[in-house]
């Protein structure tokens, strides 16, 4: 059992190290794939417009340019319409998390003995004093 847990932890550690070391390569590759997909889409639209409307290359590129602007503006419009709902949902989740954290801390504080509470207060006051001393000296 212990060997299996250690093996899983070692594999997770190795994978995390690989991700940290090669994140820039992965990110560059992702951007490259997205760029190639975009160029392919643009070229495909060029050929379709040239074939359907019998336009030359420059006219089809202008049409594709404005078509892509229209698609981008529509996506921006949809994003602006969705942002208030996303904001409200995130705000509710944040309030729920804060309330859960606060109730946990209050329960933890209630469970502490008087001696432990005095230790916590002493640690806090000493840490704050050191911080003030380091900051203002």
Image (cartoon, grey):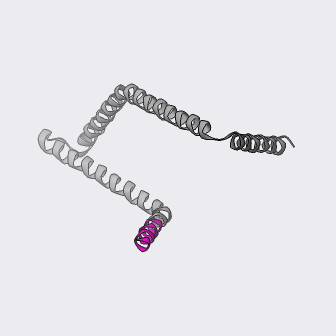
Quadrant containing the C terminus in the rendered view? top right
Give the quarter of the image for residue 134.
top right
User: Left of 129 or right of it: where is 73?
Assistant: left
Q: Nearer the viewer, residue 88 or 127?
A: 127
> Residue 116 location, x and y as percent?
69, 44
User: Left of 78 or right of it: where is 19?
Assistant: right
Q: Nearer the viewer, residue 115 or 46?
A: 115
Q: Is residue 82 above or below residue 117?
A: above
Q: Nearer the viewer, residue 73 or 60?
A: 73
Q: Does residue 8 show up magenta in the picture? A: yes
Q: Nearer the viewer, residue 58 or 47?
A: 47
User: Left of 45 or right of it: where is 35?
Assistant: right
Residue furthest out toward the right: 137
Residue extent of the magenta highlight: 1-14
> Residue 117 location, x and y as percent?
69, 40
Q: Does residue 110 show up magenta in the picture? A: no
> Residue 45 location, x and y as percent?
21, 45
Q: Is residue 35 above or below residue 26?
A: above
Residue furthest out toward the bottom: 3
């Amino acid at each position: 059992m212990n060997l299996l847990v250690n093996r899983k932890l070692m594999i997770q550690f190795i994978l995390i190290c690989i991700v940290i070391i090669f994140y820039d390569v992965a990110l560059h590759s992702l951007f490259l794939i997205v760029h190639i997909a975009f160029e392919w889409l643009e070229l495909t639209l060029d050929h379709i417009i040239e074939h359907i409307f019998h336009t030359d290359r420059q006219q089809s590129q202008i049409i594709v340019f404005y078509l892509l602007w229209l698609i981008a503006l529509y996506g921006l419009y949809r994003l602006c319409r969705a942002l208030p709902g996303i904001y409200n949902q995130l705000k509710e989740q944040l309030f729920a998390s804060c309330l859960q954290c606060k109730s946990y801390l209050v329960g933890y504080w209630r469970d502490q003995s008087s001696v432990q509470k005095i230790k916590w207060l002493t640690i806090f006051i000493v840490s704050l004093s050191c911080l003030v001393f380091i900051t203002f000296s």
